Image (cartoon, grey):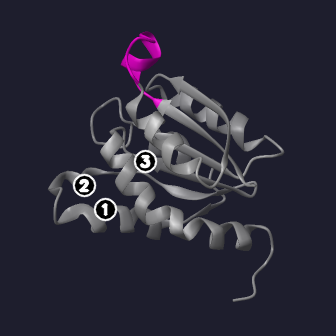
Amino acid sequence: MKKFVYITISDSRSQDSNISDGAGLKITEILEKKYQLIEKKIIPDDEITIHQTLKDFINYDDLDLIVTTGGTGVSARDVTPEATKSLLEKEIPGISELIRNEFYKDIKTSVLYRGLCGISKNKLILNLPGSPQGVQDGLSVSVPLFDHIFNLISGNTKH
């Protein structure tokens, strides 16, 4: 079974454990149907902290997927894509484009989503929006692609 971690990136949630992590709960609800959660973290919107947390997870031996939620918008504290970009060996822009395009008809602000998707050390990394609905929408279009990506990462390139 493939294994995943998620990182909730939120100043308020990292400072107050009484604030519900709805987006993180949504990630767990969706992905645990198919994959095993091995760790979760809640960290502030700080580029250095995000970068180091991602780097730590990238160096895990037995991990396939790293999902982040939060910090993908256009406010001053939204730095998840910047923290992620330098760690990616291969970017997969089509997934981010799909997430934006799929929901534009209903949610015009989806074009402000700047999350990235890519591969580093044979791990798939996906930045998702910080809302439970953004997580739901993003995973609804990306999860169907994961098995194919995992096959390619593992060297199974026959189509």
Nearer-N-terminus badge (1/3): 1
Q: Residue at x 46, y 30 (%)?
A: 9
The residue singled out by tag 1 in the image is: 100
- Asked if residue 105 lies left or right of residue 33, the reply is left
Q: Quadrant of residue 107?
A: bottom left
- Asked if residue 45 lies left or right of residue 131, the reply is right
Relative to 17, residue 130 above or below: below
The residue singled out by tag 2 in the image is: 110
Amino acid type, mark 3 = Leu
Query: Badge 2: how crowded within 10 Å, few (<14), some, or many (20+)?
Result: some
On the question of residue 82 being in view, the answer is no
Q: Give me the disc on residue 83.
A: none
Q: Residue at x 48, y 48 (%)?
A: 127
Nearer-N-terminus badge (2/3): 2
Q: Quick one: SS at disc 3?
A: strand
Report if the CB atoms under discs 2 and 1 are less than 8 Å apart: yes
Residue 94: x percent and y percent?
45, 70
The residue singled out by tag 3 in the image is: 128
Residue 105: x percent and y percent?
16, 66
Amino acid type, mark 2 = Ser
State which quarter of the image contains the N terminus. bottom right
Report if the CB atoms under discs 2 and 3 are less than 8 Å apart: no
The residue closer to the viewer here, 145 or 119, is 145
Residue 46: x percent and y percent?
47, 25
The residue closer to the viewer here, 19 or 29, is 29
